[in-house]
Image (cartoon, helix red, strand yellow):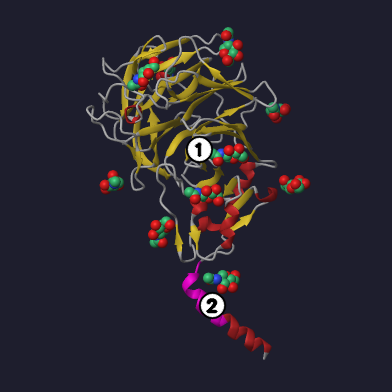
Amino acid sequence: MLNNAVLLLLSSAAAVLGQLLPAGVTTPIVQDCGFNGTVVCVNRYGAVLPYHFNRTVSANGADYDFRNTTAGNASSFDLLAGADFVVFDQKRGLQYLGENPSYQFMFSVSAAVHEAPVYAPKQNLLFLSQLAPPAGVLPQLVVNLNEDPPTLSDYEPNPPIYAPNGGSFRNGFIVFGASGGNDSIGGGEQRASLRTVDPATNQSTVLLNNYFGYYFNTIDDVAIHPVTKDIFFTDPQYSWFNALSDTAPQLGTASYRFNPATGATFLIDDTIQQPNGIAFTPDGNTLYISDTGAVSGTIDPRLGSQGTTFNTTGKRAVYAFDVTNNGTRVLNRRSFYLSQDWIPDGLKVSQEGLVLTGSGHGVDVVDDIGQLLIRIQTNYTVQNFAWTGENLTTLWLMGNNGISKVEWNIKGQRLT
Ligand SMILES: *[C@@H]1O[C@H](CO)[C@@H](O)[C@H](O)[C@H]1NC(C)=O
Ligand SMILES: *[C@@H]1O[C@H](CO)[C@@H](O)[C@H](O)[C@H]1NC(C)=O
Ligand SMILES: *[C@@H]1O[C@H](CO)[C@@H](O)[C@H](O)[C@H]1NC(C)=O
Ligand SMILES: *[C@@H]1O[C@H](CO)[C@@H](O)[C@H](O)[C@H]1NC(C)=O
Ligand SMILES: *[C@@H]1O[C@H](CO)[C@@H](O)[C@H](O)[C@H]1NC(C)=O
Ligand SMILES: *[C@@H]1O[C@H](CO)[C@@H](O)[C@H](O)[C@H]1NC(C)=O
Ligand SMILES: *[C@@H]1O[C@H](CO)[C@@H](O)[C@H](O)[C@H]1NC(C)=O
Ligand SMILES: *[C@@H]1O[C@H](CO)[C@@H](O)[C@H](O)[C@H]1NC(C)=O
Ligand SMILES: *[C@@H]1O[C@H](CO)[C@@H](O)[C@H](O)[C@H]1NC(C)=O
Ligand SMILES: *[C@@H]1O[C@H](CO)[C@@H](O)[C@H](O)[C@H]1NC(C)=O
Protein backbone atom coordinates (compact mmCIF):
# COMPACT_ATOMS: atom_id res chain seq x y z
CA MET A 1 0.00 0.00 0.00
CA LEU A 2 2.59 2.40 1.13
CA ASN A 3 4.95 1.37 -1.68
CA ASN A 4 2.22 1.80 -4.28
CA ALA A 5 1.33 5.23 -2.96
CA VAL A 6 4.97 6.32 -3.10
CA LEU A 7 5.31 4.96 -6.63
CA LEU A 8 2.18 6.79 -7.73
CA LEU A 9 3.45 10.00 -6.18
CA LEU A 10 6.86 9.61 -7.82
CA SER A 11 5.43 8.93 -11.26
CA SER A 12 3.08 11.92 -11.14
CA ALA A 13 5.95 14.10 -9.94
CA ALA A 14 8.04 12.81 -12.82
CA ALA A 15 5.25 13.68 -15.25
CA VAL A 16 5.19 17.25 -13.95
CA LEU A 17 8.95 17.54 -13.86
CA GLY A 18 9.26 15.86 -17.26
CA GLN A 19 8.86 19.15 -19.04
CA LEU A 20 11.12 21.00 -16.66
CA LEU A 21 13.85 18.43 -16.22
CA PRO A 22 15.00 16.94 -19.53
CA ALA A 23 16.59 13.51 -19.19
CA GLY A 24 20.30 14.07 -18.60
CA VAL A 25 20.16 16.87 -16.03
CA THR A 26 22.79 16.15 -13.39
CA THR A 27 21.68 17.07 -9.88
CA PRO A 28 22.97 19.01 -8.28
CA ILE A 29 24.24 21.08 -11.16
CA VAL A 30 26.40 23.13 -8.79
CA GLN A 31 27.78 21.97 -5.45
CA ASP A 32 29.88 23.39 -2.67
CA CYS A 33 33.47 22.22 -3.01
CA GLY A 34 34.74 23.27 0.41
CA PHE A 35 36.34 26.47 1.65
CA ASN A 36 33.03 27.73 3.06
CA GLY A 37 31.39 28.21 -0.32
CA THR A 38 34.19 30.25 -1.87
CA VAL A 39 34.90 27.31 -4.19
CA VAL A 40 31.99 25.67 -5.98
CA CYS A 41 32.00 22.92 -8.60
CA VAL A 42 29.81 22.74 -11.68
CA ASN A 43 29.04 19.12 -12.55
CA ARG A 44 29.46 18.06 -16.18
CA TYR A 45 29.82 21.72 -17.20
CA GLY A 46 26.06 22.15 -16.72
CA ALA A 47 25.83 20.47 -20.11
CA VAL A 48 22.07 19.92 -19.71
CA LEU A 49 20.11 22.65 -17.94
CA PRO A 50 16.50 22.38 -16.74
CA TYR A 51 13.89 24.36 -18.69
CA HIS A 52 13.15 27.23 -18.74
CA PHE A 53 16.68 28.64 -18.80
CA ASN A 54 17.91 31.93 -20.17
CA ARG A 55 21.07 34.00 -19.92
CA THR A 56 20.53 37.65 -20.71
CA VAL A 57 22.98 38.94 -23.28
CA SER A 58 25.48 41.47 -21.93
CA ALA A 59 25.69 45.07 -23.07
CA ASN A 60 27.97 48.00 -22.24
CA GLY A 61 27.77 48.42 -18.47
CA ALA A 62 25.60 45.30 -17.86
CA ASP A 63 27.55 42.09 -17.61
CA TYR A 64 25.51 38.90 -17.34
CA ASP A 65 27.89 36.00 -16.88
CA PHE A 66 27.21 32.28 -16.35
CA ARG A 67 26.10 32.83 -12.74
CA ASN A 68 23.38 35.20 -13.98
CA THR A 69 21.70 32.44 -15.99
CA THR A 70 18.22 31.62 -14.75
CA ALA A 71 17.92 27.85 -14.85
CA GLY A 72 14.43 26.53 -14.19
CA ASN A 73 14.23 25.02 -10.76
CA ALA A 74 17.96 24.57 -10.27
CA SER A 75 18.31 26.35 -6.94
CA SER A 76 21.86 24.98 -6.72
CA PHE A 77 22.71 27.63 -9.33
CA ASP A 78 22.48 30.20 -6.54
CA LEU A 79 25.73 28.79 -5.09
CA LEU A 80 27.58 30.42 -8.00
CA ALA A 81 26.73 33.92 -6.78
CA GLY A 82 28.94 33.86 -3.68
CA ALA A 83 31.87 31.88 -5.09
CA ASP A 84 35.33 33.26 -5.85
CA PHE A 85 36.33 30.16 -7.80
CA VAL A 86 34.13 28.02 -10.02
CA VAL A 87 35.68 24.64 -10.76
CA PHE A 88 34.59 22.84 -13.93
CA ASP A 89 37.13 19.99 -13.90
CA GLN A 90 37.20 18.78 -10.30
CA LYS A 91 40.30 16.58 -10.48
CA ARG A 92 42.63 19.10 -12.03
CA GLY A 93 40.84 22.27 -10.95
CA LEU A 94 41.01 21.53 -7.22
CA GLN A 95 44.66 20.46 -7.56
CA TYR A 96 45.54 23.75 -9.24
CA LEU A 97 43.69 25.72 -6.56
CA GLY A 98 45.74 23.95 -3.86
CA GLU A 99 45.17 23.63 -0.12
CA ASN A 100 44.41 27.24 0.60
CA PRO A 101 43.15 29.24 -2.38
CA SER A 102 42.18 32.81 -1.66
CA TYR A 103 40.66 35.75 -3.50
CA GLN A 104 41.01 39.24 -2.07
CA PHE A 105 39.64 42.51 -3.40
CA MET A 106 42.57 44.93 -2.85
CA PHE A 107 41.88 48.39 -4.27
CA SER A 108 38.92 50.30 -5.64
CA VAL A 109 40.07 52.33 -8.66
CA SER A 110 38.40 54.52 -11.27
CA ALA A 111 36.07 53.17 -13.94
CA ALA A 112 38.85 53.60 -16.53
CA VAL A 113 40.49 50.58 -18.11
CA HIS A 114 43.38 49.27 -15.97
CA GLU A 115 45.95 47.35 -17.97
CA ALA A 116 49.57 46.52 -18.76
CA PRO A 117 50.58 44.88 -15.47
CA VAL A 118 54.32 44.16 -15.31
CA TYR A 119 56.10 42.69 -12.31
CA ALA A 120 59.67 43.87 -11.67
CA PRO A 121 61.00 41.04 -9.47
CA LYS A 122 64.14 42.76 -8.17
CA GLN A 123 62.23 45.84 -6.96
CA ASN A 124 59.18 43.70 -6.01
CA LEU A 125 56.92 46.31 -7.64
CA LEU A 126 53.89 45.74 -9.86
CA PHE A 127 53.46 48.43 -12.51
CA LEU A 128 50.13 48.95 -14.25
CA SER A 129 48.36 51.55 -16.34
CA GLN A 130 45.13 53.50 -16.33
CA LEU A 131 43.65 54.62 -19.63
CA ALA A 132 41.34 57.55 -20.32
CA PRO A 133 38.78 58.90 -19.61
CA PRO A 134 39.72 61.60 -19.09
CA ALA A 135 41.80 61.97 -22.27
CA GLY A 136 45.35 62.96 -21.67
CA VAL A 137 45.78 61.20 -18.32
CA LEU A 138 49.46 60.54 -17.83
CA PRO A 139 50.30 59.06 -14.44
CA GLN A 140 50.22 55.29 -14.32
CA LEU A 141 50.08 53.18 -11.16
CA VAL A 142 52.44 51.05 -9.09
CA VAL A 143 51.67 48.52 -6.36
CA ASN A 144 54.44 48.32 -3.77
CA LEU A 145 54.59 44.68 -2.68
CA ASN A 146 57.30 45.41 -0.11
CA GLU A 147 54.65 47.01 2.11
CA ASP A 148 52.25 44.91 4.19
CA PRO A 149 49.51 45.38 3.15
CA PRO A 150 50.65 46.44 -0.34
CA THR A 151 50.12 50.09 -1.28
CA LEU A 152 48.95 51.70 -4.52
CA SER A 153 50.49 54.95 -5.83
CA ASP A 154 50.75 57.01 -9.00
CA TYR A 155 53.75 56.30 -11.21
CA GLU A 156 55.42 58.26 -13.98
CA PRO A 157 58.58 57.15 -15.74
CA ASN A 158 60.88 59.77 -17.28
CA PRO A 159 59.84 60.75 -19.89
CA PRO A 160 56.24 59.74 -19.16
CA ILE A 161 54.43 57.19 -21.32
CA TYR A 162 50.94 57.85 -22.65
CA ALA A 163 48.39 55.04 -22.32
CA PRO A 164 50.36 51.80 -21.91
CA ASN A 165 47.91 49.05 -22.84
CA GLY A 166 50.08 45.97 -22.49
CA GLY A 167 53.39 45.05 -20.99
CA SER A 168 56.00 42.42 -20.41
CA PHE A 169 59.52 42.10 -19.05
CA ARG A 170 62.70 41.66 -21.14
CA ASN A 171 66.38 41.70 -20.16
CA GLY A 172 65.59 43.45 -16.86
CA PHE A 173 63.48 46.15 -18.52
CA ILE A 174 59.74 46.69 -18.60
CA VAL A 175 58.40 46.64 -22.18
CA PHE A 176 55.18 48.62 -22.60
CA GLY A 177 52.88 48.68 -25.59
CA ALA A 178 51.90 52.35 -25.53
CA SER A 179 48.54 52.71 -27.23
CA GLY A 180 47.84 56.45 -27.44
CA GLY A 181 48.61 59.07 -30.09
CA ASN A 182 48.62 62.73 -29.15
CA ASP A 183 50.68 65.63 -30.52
CA SER A 184 50.91 67.52 -27.25
CA ILE A 185 51.05 65.41 -24.15
CA GLY A 186 53.63 65.18 -21.41
CA GLY A 187 55.66 67.96 -23.00
CA GLY A 188 55.67 66.60 -26.52
CA GLU A 189 54.32 64.26 -29.13
CA GLN A 190 53.69 60.58 -28.44
CA ARG A 191 52.58 57.91 -30.88
CA ALA A 192 51.53 54.30 -30.41
CA SER A 193 54.87 52.65 -29.69
CA LEU A 194 56.94 50.01 -27.99
CA ARG A 195 58.68 51.57 -24.99
CA THR A 196 60.99 50.32 -22.29
CA VAL A 197 61.38 51.42 -18.69
CA ASP A 198 64.34 50.55 -16.49
CA PRO A 199 62.72 49.79 -13.11
CA ALA A 200 66.01 50.66 -11.37
CA THR A 201 66.05 54.26 -12.67
CA ASN A 202 62.52 54.80 -14.10
CA GLN A 203 64.10 56.10 -17.35
CA SER A 204 62.08 55.28 -20.47
CA THR A 205 63.09 54.88 -24.12
CA VAL A 206 61.31 54.23 -27.43
CA LEU A 207 62.01 51.02 -29.39
CA LEU A 208 59.50 51.41 -32.24
CA ASN A 209 56.94 54.08 -33.12
CA ASN A 210 55.98 53.59 -36.79
CA TYR A 211 55.52 51.19 -39.69
CA PHE A 212 57.45 52.89 -42.50
CA GLY A 213 56.02 56.24 -41.45
CA TYR A 214 52.48 55.16 -40.60
CA TYR A 215 51.28 55.39 -37.02
CA PHE A 216 50.38 52.09 -35.40
CA ASN A 217 46.73 52.16 -34.28
CA THR A 218 46.81 50.96 -30.66
CA ILE A 219 49.85 48.93 -29.73
CA ASP A 220 47.87 46.83 -27.31
CA ASP A 221 49.44 43.81 -25.75
CA VAL A 222 52.98 42.46 -26.03
CA ALA A 223 54.64 39.06 -25.55
CA ILE A 224 58.34 38.23 -25.57
CA HIS A 225 59.38 35.06 -27.41
CA PRO A 226 61.07 32.98 -24.68
CA VAL A 227 63.97 31.86 -26.91
CA THR A 228 64.71 34.72 -29.31
CA LYS A 229 63.40 37.55 -27.05
CA ASP A 230 61.76 39.18 -30.08
CA ILE A 231 58.78 41.35 -29.12
CA PHE A 232 55.42 40.23 -30.53
CA PHE A 233 52.49 42.66 -30.33
CA THR A 234 48.90 43.20 -31.39
CA ASP A 235 47.60 46.35 -33.07
CA PRO A 236 43.80 46.69 -32.85
CA GLN A 237 41.99 50.03 -33.30
CA TYR A 238 40.63 50.80 -29.82
CA SER A 239 42.61 54.01 -29.35
CA TRP A 240 40.61 55.59 -32.16
CA PHE A 241 37.27 54.21 -30.92
CA ASN A 242 38.02 55.37 -27.36
CA ALA A 243 39.50 58.81 -28.10
CA LEU A 244 43.05 57.96 -27.08
CA SER A 245 44.38 58.84 -30.52
CA ASP A 246 44.05 62.13 -32.41
CA THR A 247 44.43 60.35 -35.78
CA ALA A 248 42.10 57.84 -37.45
CA PRO A 249 43.64 54.43 -38.24
CA GLN A 250 46.20 54.41 -41.06
CA LEU A 251 46.73 50.63 -40.93
CA GLY A 252 44.41 47.63 -40.79
CA THR A 253 44.29 45.58 -37.61
CA ALA A 254 47.21 43.15 -37.40
CA SER A 255 49.78 41.45 -35.18
CA TYR A 256 53.54 41.87 -35.57
CA ARG A 257 56.97 40.67 -34.50
CA PHE A 258 59.66 43.25 -33.75
CA ASN A 259 63.35 42.33 -33.65
CA PRO A 260 65.09 44.91 -31.42
CA ALA A 261 68.53 43.82 -32.71
CA THR A 262 67.82 44.93 -36.30
CA GLY A 263 64.84 47.28 -35.92
CA ALA A 264 62.85 45.17 -38.38
CA THR A 265 59.08 44.71 -37.98
CA PHE A 266 57.35 41.63 -39.43
CA LEU A 267 53.61 41.11 -40.06
CA ILE A 268 52.61 37.80 -38.44
CA ASP A 269 48.81 37.82 -38.82
CA ASP A 270 46.15 40.05 -40.34
CA THR A 271 43.16 37.69 -40.14
CA ILE A 272 41.94 38.64 -36.66
CA GLN A 273 39.31 41.41 -36.43
CA GLN A 274 40.60 43.10 -33.26
CA PRO A 275 43.75 41.28 -32.08
CA ASN A 276 44.17 41.90 -28.37
CA GLY A 277 45.80 39.53 -25.85
CA ILE A 278 48.97 37.72 -26.96
CA ALA A 279 50.99 35.04 -25.14
CA PHE A 280 53.54 32.26 -25.68
CA THR A 281 53.78 28.82 -24.14
CA PRO A 282 56.97 28.44 -22.06
CA ASP A 283 58.76 26.61 -24.94
CA GLY A 284 57.81 29.36 -27.42
CA ASN A 285 56.33 26.85 -29.86
CA THR A 286 52.70 27.97 -29.54
CA LEU A 287 51.39 31.53 -29.76
CA TYR A 288 47.90 32.51 -28.61
CA ILE A 289 46.15 35.67 -29.78
CA SER A 290 42.66 36.72 -28.75
CA ASP A 291 40.11 38.32 -31.06
CA THR A 292 37.92 40.87 -29.26
CA GLY A 293 36.08 42.02 -32.39
CA ALA A 294 32.76 41.70 -30.51
CA VAL A 295 33.71 45.03 -28.94
CA SER A 296 34.23 47.42 -31.81
CA GLY A 297 33.47 50.87 -33.18
CA THR A 298 33.35 52.91 -36.35
CA ILE A 299 36.14 54.62 -38.27
CA ASP A 300 35.07 57.91 -39.77
CA PRO A 301 37.61 60.71 -39.36
CA ARG A 302 34.83 63.30 -39.79
CA LEU A 303 32.76 61.88 -36.92
CA GLY A 304 35.73 61.35 -34.61
CA SER A 305 35.74 58.78 -31.82
CA GLN A 306 32.34 57.22 -31.21
CA GLY A 307 33.14 54.70 -28.45
CA THR A 308 32.50 50.97 -28.74
CA THR A 309 29.54 48.62 -28.57
CA PHE A 310 29.30 44.93 -27.68
CA ASN A 311 27.91 42.52 -30.25
CA THR A 312 27.35 39.10 -28.69
CA THR A 313 27.67 37.29 -32.05
CA GLY A 314 30.93 39.04 -32.86
CA LYS A 315 34.41 37.55 -32.43
CA ARG A 316 35.40 36.82 -28.85
CA ALA A 317 37.69 33.83 -29.03
CA VAL A 318 41.31 32.85 -28.49
CA TYR A 319 43.25 31.43 -31.46
CA ALA A 320 46.37 29.26 -31.35
CA PHE A 321 49.25 29.29 -33.83
CA ASP A 322 52.36 27.13 -34.25
CA VAL A 323 55.65 29.00 -34.07
CA THR A 324 58.57 27.45 -35.95
CA ASN A 325 61.96 28.34 -37.45
CA ASN A 326 63.39 29.77 -34.23
CA GLY A 327 60.44 32.08 -33.65
CA THR A 328 60.27 33.50 -37.17
CA ARG A 329 57.36 31.57 -38.70
CA VAL A 330 53.81 31.78 -37.34
CA LEU A 331 51.39 29.32 -38.95
CA ASN A 332 48.41 26.94 -38.56
CA ARG A 333 45.93 29.34 -37.03
CA ARG A 334 43.21 27.40 -35.22
CA SER A 335 40.22 28.19 -33.03
CA PHE A 336 41.12 27.46 -29.41
CA TYR A 337 38.66 28.86 -26.85
CA LEU A 338 35.43 30.87 -26.93
CA SER A 339 35.35 33.04 -23.82
CA GLN A 340 32.35 32.24 -21.63
CA ASP A 341 31.85 35.89 -20.80
CA TRP A 342 32.25 39.23 -22.62
CA ILE A 343 35.57 39.23 -24.58
CA PRO A 344 38.92 37.50 -23.95
CA ASP A 345 41.03 40.56 -23.15
CA GLY A 346 44.31 39.94 -21.27
CA LEU A 347 45.90 36.59 -22.15
CA LYS A 348 48.78 34.78 -20.42
CA VAL A 349 50.16 31.25 -20.26
CA SER A 350 51.23 29.81 -16.91
CA GLN A 351 54.42 27.85 -16.18
CA GLU A 352 52.30 24.67 -16.44
CA GLY A 353 51.07 25.66 -19.91
CA LEU A 354 47.56 26.67 -18.76
CA VAL A 355 46.01 29.51 -20.76
CA LEU A 356 44.38 32.31 -18.75
CA THR A 357 42.19 35.02 -20.19
CA GLY A 358 40.43 37.96 -18.55
CA SER A 359 36.83 37.67 -19.74
CA GLY A 360 34.25 40.04 -18.31
CA HIS A 361 33.69 39.58 -14.59
CA GLY A 362 36.46 37.04 -14.15
CA VAL A 363 39.37 35.06 -15.50
CA ASP A 364 39.02 31.75 -17.32
CA VAL A 365 41.71 29.08 -16.85
CA VAL A 366 41.85 26.55 -19.68
CA ASP A 367 44.22 23.70 -20.47
CA ASP A 368 46.31 23.28 -23.63
CA ILE A 369 43.44 21.75 -25.61
CA GLY A 370 41.07 24.57 -24.67
CA GLN A 371 39.15 22.82 -21.87
CA LEU A 372 37.91 25.17 -19.15
CA LEU A 373 39.16 24.05 -15.71
CA ILE A 374 38.50 27.01 -13.39
CA ARG A 375 36.93 30.44 -13.49
CA ILE A 376 37.89 33.16 -11.03
CA GLN A 377 34.80 35.31 -10.41
CA THR A 378 35.12 39.04 -9.77
CA ASN A 379 32.65 41.87 -9.29
CA TYR A 380 34.31 44.05 -11.95
CA THR A 381 35.44 43.61 -15.56
CA VAL A 382 38.99 42.25 -15.63
CA GLN A 383 41.22 43.57 -18.38
CA ASN A 384 44.52 41.95 -17.46
CA PHE A 385 46.55 40.18 -14.77
CA ALA A 386 50.12 39.28 -13.81
CA TRP A 387 51.88 36.95 -11.40
CA THR A 388 54.05 38.32 -8.60
CA GLY A 389 56.18 37.07 -5.72
CA GLU A 390 59.24 34.91 -5.29
CA ASN A 391 57.53 31.79 -6.64
CA LEU A 392 55.06 33.58 -8.91
CA THR A 393 52.02 31.98 -7.23
CA THR A 394 50.15 35.24 -6.59
CA LEU A 395 48.01 36.51 -9.44
CA TRP A 396 47.04 40.20 -9.48
CA LEU A 397 43.94 41.08 -11.52
CA MET A 398 42.91 44.56 -12.64
CA GLY A 399 40.19 46.24 -14.64
CA ASN A 400 37.38 48.82 -14.48
CA ASN A 401 36.85 49.77 -10.82
CA GLY A 402 39.02 47.14 -9.19
CA ILE A 403 42.33 45.48 -8.41
CA SER A 404 42.32 42.10 -6.66
CA LYS A 405 44.64 39.18 -6.01
CA VAL A 406 44.52 35.42 -5.94
CA GLU A 407 46.77 32.92 -4.12
CA TRP A 408 46.80 29.42 -5.61
CA ASN A 409 48.99 26.71 -7.12
CA ILE A 410 49.18 28.09 -10.66
CA LYS A 411 52.55 29.69 -11.34
CA GLY A 412 53.50 32.42 -13.77
CA GLN A 413 56.30 32.07 -16.31
CA ARG A 414 59.51 33.57 -15.01
CA LEU A 415 60.28 36.57 -17.23
CA THR A 416 63.89 37.72 -17.17
C1 LIG B 1 35.10 28.30 7.39
O1 LIG B 1 34.71 29.36 8.24
C2 LIG B 1 34.93 29.08 9.63
C3 LIG B 1 34.31 30.21 10.46
O2 LIG B 1 34.51 31.45 9.86
C4 LIG B 1 36.42 28.92 9.87
O3 LIG B 1 36.67 28.61 11.22
C5 LIG B 1 36.94 27.79 8.98
O4 LIG B 1 38.34 27.71 9.09
C6 LIG B 1 36.58 28.04 7.53
N1 LIG B 1 36.95 26.86 6.76
C7 LIG B 1 37.60 26.94 5.59
C8 LIG B 1 37.88 25.63 4.92
O5 LIG B 1 37.95 27.99 5.10
C1 LIG C 1 15.77 36.15 -21.54
O1 LIG C 1 15.88 37.23 -20.60
C2 LIG C 1 15.84 38.52 -21.18
C3 LIG C 1 16.07 39.54 -20.10
O2 LIG C 1 15.24 39.32 -19.02
C4 LIG C 1 14.52 38.72 -21.90
O3 LIG C 1 14.55 39.98 -22.54
C5 LIG C 1 14.35 37.64 -22.94
O4 LIG C 1 13.07 37.76 -23.51
C6 LIG C 1 14.46 36.26 -22.29
N1 LIG C 1 14.41 35.26 -23.35
C7 LIG C 1 13.79 34.12 -23.19
C8 LIG C 1 13.74 33.20 -24.37
O5 LIG C 1 13.33 33.80 -22.12
C1 LIG D 1 11.19 22.27 -7.94
O1 LIG D 1 11.70 21.10 -7.34
C2 LIG D 1 11.02 20.71 -6.15
C3 LIG D 1 11.68 19.46 -5.59
O2 LIG D 1 13.05 19.60 -5.60
C4 LIG D 1 9.57 20.44 -6.47
O3 LIG D 1 8.88 20.17 -5.25
C5 LIG D 1 8.96 21.62 -7.16
O4 LIG D 1 7.66 21.31 -7.58
C6 LIG D 1 9.76 22.05 -8.37
N1 LIG D 1 9.21 23.25 -8.95
C7 LIG D 1 9.11 23.43 -10.25
C8 LIG D 1 8.54 24.73 -10.72
O5 LIG D 1 9.51 22.60 -11.03
C1 LIG E 1 24.99 38.67 -11.78
O1 LIG E 1 25.05 37.93 -10.58
C2 LIG E 1 25.85 38.51 -9.55
C3 LIG E 1 25.91 37.54 -8.41
O2 LIG E 1 24.62 37.21 -7.99
C4 LIG E 1 25.23 39.85 -9.15
O3 LIG E 1 26.03 40.46 -8.16
C5 LIG E 1 25.16 40.73 -10.38
O4 LIG E 1 24.52 41.95 -10.05
C6 LIG E 1 24.40 40.04 -11.51
N1 LIG E 1 24.52 40.84 -12.72
C7 LIG E 1 23.48 41.41 -13.31
C8 LIG E 1 23.77 42.23 -14.52
O5 LIG E 1 22.36 41.27 -12.90
C1 LIG F 1 45.99 65.17 -25.89
O1 LIG F 1 46.46 65.46 -24.57
C2 LIG F 1 45.92 66.66 -24.04
C3 LIG F 1 46.56 66.87 -22.69
O2 LIG F 1 47.88 67.25 -22.85
C4 LIG F 1 44.43 66.53 -23.90
O3 LIG F 1 43.89 67.74 -23.44
C5 LIG F 1 43.83 66.18 -25.24
O4 LIG F 1 42.45 65.92 -25.09
C6 LIG F 1 44.50 64.95 -25.82
N1 LIG F 1 43.98 64.65 -27.13
C7 LIG F 1 43.58 63.42 -27.46
C8 LIG F 1 43.04 63.27 -28.83
O5 LIG F 1 43.66 62.48 -26.70
C1 LIG G 1 61.27 54.48 -9.47
O1 LIG G 1 59.89 54.41 -9.16
C2 LIG G 1 59.59 53.56 -8.06
C3 LIG G 1 58.07 53.44 -7.95
O2 LIG G 1 57.49 54.70 -7.78
C4 LIG G 1 60.23 54.12 -6.80
O3 LIG G 1 59.97 53.26 -5.72
C5 LIG G 1 61.72 54.26 -7.01
O4 LIG G 1 62.30 54.91 -5.90
C6 LIG G 1 62.04 55.05 -8.28
N1 LIG G 1 63.46 54.95 -8.53
C7 LIG G 1 64.22 56.03 -8.77
C8 LIG G 1 65.65 55.78 -8.99
O5 LIG G 1 63.72 57.14 -8.78
C1 LIG H 1 67.55 31.84 -32.73
O1 LIG H 1 67.48 33.26 -32.73
C2 LIG H 1 68.32 33.86 -31.77
C3 LIG H 1 68.01 35.35 -31.75
O2 LIG H 1 67.96 35.87 -33.04
C4 LIG H 1 69.77 33.58 -32.11
O3 LIG H 1 70.61 34.14 -31.13
C5 LIG H 1 69.96 32.06 -32.12
O4 LIG H 1 71.27 31.77 -32.57
C6 LIG H 1 68.96 31.42 -33.07
N1 LIG H 1 69.06 29.97 -32.93
C7 LIG H 1 69.08 29.16 -33.96
C8 LIG H 1 69.12 27.70 -33.66
O5 LIG H 1 69.05 29.58 -35.11
C1 LIG I 1 26.63 41.76 -34.93
O1 LIG I 1 27.50 40.88 -35.60
C2 LIG I 1 26.85 40.11 -36.60
C3 LIG I 1 27.89 39.16 -37.14
O2 LIG I 1 28.28 38.29 -36.15
C4 LIG I 1 26.30 41.01 -37.67
O3 LIG I 1 25.59 40.23 -38.60
C5 LIG I 1 25.35 42.01 -37.03
O4 LIG I 1 24.95 42.95 -38.01
C6 LIG I 1 26.04 42.76 -35.93
N1 LIG I 1 25.09 43.62 -35.25
C7 LIG I 1 25.32 44.90 -35.08
C8 LIG I 1 24.26 45.66 -34.34
O5 LIG I 1 26.32 45.46 -35.46
C1 LIG J 1 33.60 44.63 -5.19
O1 LIG J 1 33.62 44.08 -3.89
C2 LIG J 1 34.43 44.78 -2.96
C3 LIG J 1 34.38 44.05 -1.64
O2 LIG J 1 34.68 42.73 -1.79
C4 LIG J 1 33.91 46.19 -2.79
O3 LIG J 1 34.77 46.89 -1.92
C5 LIG J 1 33.90 46.88 -4.15
O4 LIG J 1 33.33 48.15 -4.03
C6 LIG J 1 33.09 46.06 -5.14
N1 LIG J 1 33.24 46.66 -6.46
C7 LIG J 1 32.26 46.81 -7.32
C8 LIG J 1 32.58 47.47 -8.61
O5 LIG J 1 31.14 46.41 -7.07
C1 LIG K 1 59.05 29.66 -2.55
O1 LIG K 1 59.27 28.28 -2.66
C2 LIG K 1 60.33 27.82 -1.82
C3 LIG K 1 60.57 26.36 -2.16
O2 LIG K 1 59.38 25.64 -2.15
C4 LIG K 1 59.94 28.04 -0.38
O3 LIG K 1 61.00 27.63 0.48
C5 LIG K 1 59.67 29.53 -0.15
O4 LIG K 1 59.21 29.72 1.18
C6 LIG K 1 58.62 30.02 -1.11
N1 LIG K 1 58.49 31.46 -1.00
C7 LIG K 1 57.35 32.05 -0.73
C8 LIG K 1 57.34 33.54 -0.63
O5 LIG K 1 56.30 31.44 -0.60
- The reply to whether the residue tagged 1 has its Cβ within 8 angstroms of ligand 10 is no
Mark 2 Cα-neighbour bin, 10 Å: few <14, some 14–19, many ≥20: few
Q: Which mark is residue 356?
A: 1
Give me the residue at 59% from left, 86% from top. Answer: 8
Whether residue 18 appears in magenta in the rendering, the answer is yes
In what quadrant of the picture does the C terminus appear? top right
Question: Amino acid under label 2?
Answer: Ala
**Which residue is rendered at x = 44% and y = 10% of the image?**
205
Q: Where is the N terminus found, in terms of image quarters?
A: bottom right
Element on which disc 2 rests: helix
| Quarter of image, res 142 | top right
Which residue, as the protein is rendered here, is positioned at the far front? Answer: 134
- Of circles 2 and 1, the one toward us is 2
Q: Residue at x 64, y 44 (%)?
A: 95
Residue 395: quadrant of the picture: top right
Q: Nearer the viewer, residue 336 or 151?
A: 151
The residue nearer to you, when weighing 89 against 249, is 249
